[in-house]
Image: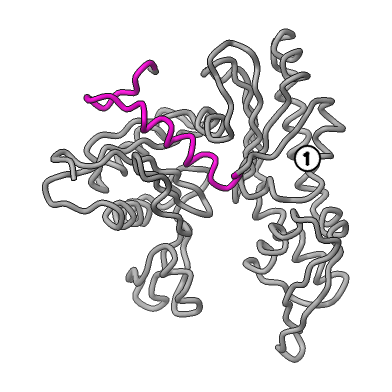
Amino acid sequence: MRLLGRDLAMDLGAASTRIYARRKGIVLDEPSAVMCDGRTGKVIGYGAEAAALGGGGRTCWPVSGGLPADTELARRMIRHFLRKVHWHPYARPRVIMALPSDSTPIDRAALRDIAYEAEARTVQLVPHALAAALGAGMELTDCTGHMVIDIGRDAARVAVLSGESVVAAGSVPYGGQAVNRAIARFVEREHGLLLDEPEAESAKRRAGGGDRQIMVHARDPDTGRERELALPVERIFEAAAQPVESIVRTAMETVERCPAELTADLGVRGAVLVGGGALLRGLGRRLRETLCMPVRRAERPLEAVALGLGRCVDELGPIGRLRGRP
């Protein structure tokens, strides 16, 4: 171990937190969840442990839109994750984190402060869209236009980049969670069964495969018994139409704010989808039809931001500044 600690990249997502270590890749991938005792409020678990505890307490999600929503719980969760992958009493890690494009100076200061309080030695913030683009394999060496559509748990963010600069950006509070709720409402309306969010999330992800239908487990509200149900994949996409249309409209509005030369680049280079919502079948086709440009899904959409931050970790200089970046 280096005397001054390891260099880490942290993708602090609303659904999951991922940590990338230099020369090792992603070393942690756990839910951004904290389990608290329902009676005393005491924290009894973090991440995967909190998810495994199930009904043992109250599950809190202290991150929203890539920023802390509950400052204290977020700080404790980040410290727990950092200690899990790197613990040394005299060697704190240098950390790179993603910063959403719609964040304010107060948001940036709060994110830095929480990371420092969680025992980071230095904190470097990288634009979220830039990290997603790098993680999706884009080479941002010139000033041509690139588009990234990141569909997270609680929001979808669209950004157009020229080189490493964000030229236009937009967001909408419809993400993977909104799609999950739409799927659950569809199951309740059409079949009279209750589908919990983890099962709806699983259905959304599996719908991105090649199967025409998928099996889900829903609960009968009258008997409380679990029932297996076959859902056609096309009906899942139809159920998610409202949040999908909001995402498509935001992407279109973002393109319209771009200079003409970048719009021409996008017509050739297209857009890349990242985040859990990118797994929804039919979304890419709907975007292609509306935007009139190629749209592809990143090879590893769930890990794209963490992998992009990892590329930044490899460029971290000896004094904690990114070489060649502001």
Rendered location of residue 33, percent (x, y): 45, 61
Q: What x and y, as percent, mark residue 275?
A: 61, 45
Q: Residue at x 42, y 48 (%)?
A: 26
Horizontal side, residue 25 vs residue 319: left or right:
right
Residue at horizontal 40 percent and vertical 47 percent from the top: 19
All told, the count of numbered labels is: 1
Q: Is residue 82 magenta?
A: no
Q: Residue at x 47, y 74 (%)?
A: 52
Q: Amino acid at mark 1?
A: Gly
Residue 138: x, y in percent? 58, 26
Colouring scheme, one of rainbow, by chain, secondary structure, one colour? one colour
Q: Which quarter of the image is occupied by the N terminus?
A: top left
Q: Residue furthest front?
A: 23
Q: Which quarter of the picture shows residue 77?
A: bottom left
85 left or right of 60 in image: left
Disc 1 is placed on an element classified as helix
Q: Residue 231: x, y in percent?
A: 83, 68
Compare residues 211 and 9 and report the one nearer the observer.
211
Q: Which is more toward the observer, 110 or 196?
A: 196
Q: Is residue 41 above or below residue 24?
A: below
Residue that label 1 marks: 284
- Determine whether 303 is above or below 310 in the image: below
Q: Is residue 313 magenta?
A: yes
The quadrant in which the C terminus is found is top left
Q: Quadrant of residue 292?
A: top right
Q: Nearer the viewer, residue 94 or 178?
A: 94
> What is the crowding at mark 1: few (fewer than 14 residues within 10 Å), some, or many (at least 20)?
some
Q: Is residue 45 left or right of residue 3?
A: right
* Residue at 49% across, 48% down: 13
Q: Which residues are magenta?
A: 300-324
Question: Which residue of the protein is positioned furthest toward the bottom in this rendering?
Answer: 223
